[in-house]
Amino acid sequence: MRLPNREGEPLAFTISDGAHWNAFARSNLTLNSANAEVIQWQPYEGTSLGQKARGWLRFAHTGELGGLLGQIIAGVGCLGGVFLVYTGLSLAFRRLWNWALWKRLRSQSRDPLGMTSSAASRETAME
């Protein structure tokens, strides 16, 4: 039930329909808050195929649709997402660390003239 924020706004009810084999079948009822007159009634049978699919998918992606097995599958998927975040961050930190390490090693391998050791060996080989 959604109560109105201001006086005069309608009351909205979402009713679980126990007559269907689908435990997530929902019908919507909207009433005038002043006199309880029905403004809109949307039974589950009258909803579009898209609304029905949205209702199914909403509970399927959280694992509620498949009972305990569905929740276990959703939990494993969630742990897989955590593992992907961990591996992505660890790879990024490793690359950052190696980049900083190589930068330090290159700066240490320069000779006093500002040439790298490989460039200095090429200079002596040319002479």
Image: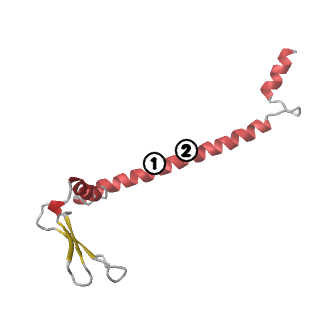
Horizontal arrangement in the rendering, residue 110 relative to residue 65 (left or right)? right
Q: Label 2 sits on what residue type?
A: Leu
How many residues crowd mark 2 within 10 Å: few (<14), some (14–19), many (20+)?
A: few
Residue drawn at (12%, 61%) of the image: 21
Indicate the quadrant where residue 115 lies. top right
State the separation of the CA atoms marked 2 and 1. 11 Å
- Percent x, y of residue 94: 59, 44
- Percent x, y of residue 11: 27, 77
Residue 125, visible in the rendered structure: yes
The answer to which of 20 and 42 lies nearer the viewer is 42
Q: Quadrant of the N terminus?
A: bottom left
Q: Which residue is mark 2?
A: 91
Horizontal arrangement in the rendering, residue 76 relative to residue 93 (left or right)? left
Counting labels gives 2
- Percent x, y of residue 33: 27, 82
- Label 1: element kind: helix
- Label 2: element kind: helix
The answer to which of 82 and 44 lies nearer the viewer is 44
Indicate the quadrant where residue 108 lies. top right
Residue drawn at (54%, 48%) of the image: 90
Residue drawn at (61%, 42%) of the image: 95
Residue 22, visible in the rendered structure: no
How many residues crowd mark 1 within 10 Å: few (<14), some (14–19), many (20+)?
A: few
The answer to which of 66 and 102 lies nearer the viewer is 66
Residue drawn at (82%, 34%) of the image: 110
Horizontal arrangement in the rendering, residue 67 relative to residue 107 (left or right)? left
User: On screen, 96 above or below 113?
Assistant: below
Q: Earlier in the sequence, mark 2 or mark 1?
A: 1
Marking on residue 84: 1
Q: Quadrant of the C terminus?
A: top right
Q: Label 1 sits on what residue type?
A: Leu
